[in-house]
Amino acid sequence: MKNYDNILSNYFSGNASEEEVLLVKEKLASSEDFKTRYESYAQVWELTNRLNHDDSRLDESWQDFKAIVKAPEKVFGFDWLKVAASILILAAFSVGIYLMVPKGQTYTANKEQSQVELLDHSQIVLSEGSELFQSKSFGVDERRLRLDGEALFRVEKAEIPFVVETDMGEVKVTGTEFNLFQLAGSDYLAIDLIEGSVIFTDPKGKPSSLSAGQRLELDGLELNILNDNSTVLWVDSDEIRCQSVPLKQILLELSKHYEVDHRVTRKHLSERYTISLPKDDIHSCIELLSKLSGLDLDLQENGVIVSR
């Protein structure tokens, strides 16, 4: 007989064998009772990740509390120490209940890339300056995330859909590898599909299917799918590497790194360039882009890139 408690413990701690991972996925798809048990383990696992585990002052704090309320202990027939202790226990219970309520998980890459492994063993490379939010119900009926920035997703295959939300729509897969670029607040999105297939649904609910090797670009209301995907925009420890990348995406990448906005005419934004840009000198970036594009780009004091 299978010990599902041990299997789930291994699964959430990342120590499950391939056979155990497969078993969990199969049981999630076929058993409501197992799904309920899975959700309980997910909540406990999230709680343990949030706890401090520092119990060094627990007894000291309790003694301090008793010293505060010990005199007088009985007034008008009431044992005030017990009353106060009951209040404290009730408060602690309330805090415990609050902590047990499942909450989402946020992953942030600040000055460098961040490697993330999710509970389903999917692998994500989060580009610096990007943020990924994991839904509190991740792994129950779907594996839902929200991205602000850029990330490379290597999705573990499963029956449960893997969904990434953005301001410009959402990407849905069951197992594949793709790169997604979308800055919150911008009207541009790019998907580079490396392996498998994805379905992208725009803000109006219109779906578009992608096959391996294709690239989808959504610029405002204009959606294009490129069959010969030679476009690359990626950031390593030294530079921002762009291969046949639209100027708009390059400028958005710079806005992520340097917190500068841009104001360039639309016809220039769609032109593609291959260039490597430094990560630590915005003035050099603008100078290199100006020389390559033939545009007179300038970085003004208010931080806006302008085409004159």
Image: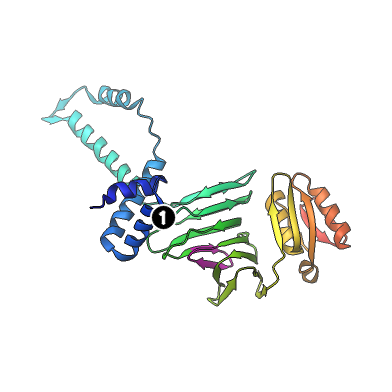
Find residue 184 and report its horizontal and vertical position in percent: 60, 59
Amino acid type for the residue under numbered disc 1: Lys
Q: Nearer the viewer, residue 242 or 68?
A: 242
Residue 258 visible somewhere in the drawing: yes
Give the overall secondary structure of the magenta segment.
Answer: strand
Q: Is residue 84 above or below residue 262?
A: above
Q: Is residue 41 left or right of residue 222?
A: left
Q: Is residue 47 above or below residue 165?
A: above
Q: Which residues are magenta?
A: 163-176
Q: Is residue 156 magenta?
A: no
Q: Residue at x 65, y 65 (%)?
A: 190
Q: Nearer the viewer, residue 235 or 74?
A: 235
Q: Is residue 145 left or right of residue 80?
A: right
Find residue 289 and report its horizontal and vertical position in percent: 83, 57
Q: Which residue is disc 1 drawn over?
A: 136
Q: How is the image coloured?
A: rainbow
